[in-house]
Image (tube, helix red, strand yellow):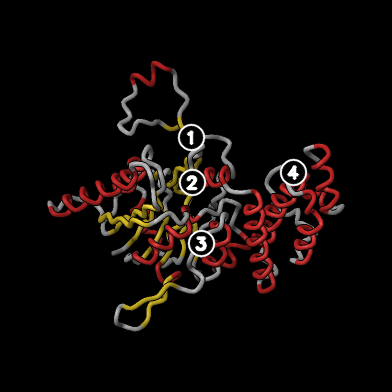
């Protein structure tokens, strides 16, 4: 098996078929799709089972169709669902897809050709944000979309076109230092199995690498996981090929979490990631990406302090100071808003929180 595509699924009955069909319509053979139903309460589990049956029937008839498997488990979050897929994956390469997103057709062959030709541990590809198309009543009536939804490219992207166009093969550390932007979603990578999973001997026995699993039960598991994965990689490269359509809507996994999580837990999760980055920076003090991401997340913490937890300001800011993250870096911060916020923080995080508290902005 050349590739395992791991898809965590949770209450996405409206979008799941388009996602899976996009993974089927590829110019490549010898790969599998692992659907991890994370305790869905809608029709998603049945849809997963239907795809498994279709896959089995097609393969019996020798039709071109990837192997589709499903794992049903109690709800445990995106990180746990991805981990469950990792533990069952058979492919020489691995990748992740969110179940409300979709791929462009016939791109997998190009991706796998480059990954194998260059013997890469990690290949990063491009993405774009899409949203539901705004339609008139007449267009909804006449629509021929078999999935019941239509999409349009959404600009500006959250972090538009963050995949670099350089073609030099570098280490994961150098990629983080010089080429990684803020778009650091796990769904943007083809990853060689050996980067995450340690093979033991010639008996086909393997184990998950120490640093490959997602931390379960937290939000921001993507940004916490990414440097652990990249620092294991020896050969990393990019392709400008547009592969991934990242669906921005109110029901997406990320945004549902953002709406439902308790603010206090959200704060603690951000503090956890910031602290992890501080540990990495002791070993890799020149890594620009770690410093930049730490600054971005610290701004999020300080904004939450100002708006919700102002009475606990001293406690949180003291914890941040202990992580040796001030002053926040000005390097490569992408927006004028962020740069101004960092500039205000040069006068101290307490002042920043006070201004935010009094005015709602700085």
Q: Secondary structure at mark 2?
A: helix
Which labelled disc corresponds to residue 216?
3
Measured in 3D between alpha carbons, the distance from the residue under mark 2 to the one under mark 1, in whole angstroms, is 14 Å
For mark 1, what is the residue?
131
The earlier-in-sequence mark between 4 and 3 is: 3
- Element class at badge 3: loop
**Would you name the residue on which mark 4 appears?**
307
**How much space separates mark 4 and mark 1, taking CA atoms?**
29 Å
Residue 253 circle label:
2
Left/right placement of residue 89 relative to residue 251 reads left
Counting from the top left corner in percent of width and height, residue 75 is at 43, 54
Dot 3 crowding, Cα within 10 Å, few <14, some 14–19, many 20+: some
The tag earlier along the polypeptide, 4 or 1, is 1
> Residue visible at 33% across and 78% down?
205
**Is 284 left, or right, of 225 in this rendering?**
right
Quarter placement of the N terminus: bottom left
* Up/down of 192 relative to 243, above or below: below
| Image marks 4 and 1: residues in contact by CB distance under 8 Å | no
């Amino acid at each position: 098996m050349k590739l395992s595509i791991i898809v965590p699924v949770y209450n996405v009955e409206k979008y799941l078929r388009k996602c899976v069909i996009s993974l089927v319509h590829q110019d490549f053979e010898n790969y599998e799709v692992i659907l991890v139903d994370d305790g869905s309460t809608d029709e998603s589990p049945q849809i997963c089972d239907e795809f498994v049956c279709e896959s089995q029937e097609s393969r019996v008839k020798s039709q071109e169709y990837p192997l589709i498997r499903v794992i049903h488990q109690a709800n445990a979050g995106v990180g746990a669902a991805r981990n469950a897929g990792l533990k069952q994956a058979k492919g020489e390469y691995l990748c992740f897809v969110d179940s409300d997103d979709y791929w462009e057709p016939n791109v997998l062959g190009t991706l796998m050709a480059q990954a194998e030709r260059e013997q890469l541990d990690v290949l990063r590809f491009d993405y774009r944000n899409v949203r539901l198309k705004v339609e008139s009543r007449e267009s909804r009536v006449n629509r021929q979309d078999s999935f019941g939804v239509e999409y349009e490219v959404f600009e500006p992207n959250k972090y538009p076109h963050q995949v670099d166009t350089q073609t030099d093969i570098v280490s994961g550390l150098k990629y983080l230092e010089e080429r990684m932007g803020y778009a650091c979603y796990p769904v943007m990578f083809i990853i060689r199995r050996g980067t995450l999973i340690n093979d033991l001997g010639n008996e086909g026995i393997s184990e998950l690498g120490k640093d490959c699993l997602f931390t379960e039960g937290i939000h921001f598991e993507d940004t916490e996981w990414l440097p652990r994965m990249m620092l294991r990689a020896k050969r990393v490269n990019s392709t400008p090929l547009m592969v991934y359509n990242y669906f921005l809507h109110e029901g997406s996994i990320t945004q549902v979490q953002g709406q439902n999580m308790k603010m206090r837990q959200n704060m603690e999760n951000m503090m956890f990631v910031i602290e992890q980055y501080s540990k990495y920076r002791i070993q890799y003090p020149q890594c620009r990406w770690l410093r930049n991401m730490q600054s971005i997340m610290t701004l999020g913490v300080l904004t939450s302090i100002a708006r919700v937890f102002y009475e606990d300001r001293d406690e949180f800011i003291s914890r941040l100071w202990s992580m040796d993250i001030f002053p926040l870096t000005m390097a490569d911060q992408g927006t004028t808003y962020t740069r101004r916020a960092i500039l205000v923080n040069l006068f101290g995080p307490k002042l920043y929180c006070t201004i935010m508290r009094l005015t709602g902005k700085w």
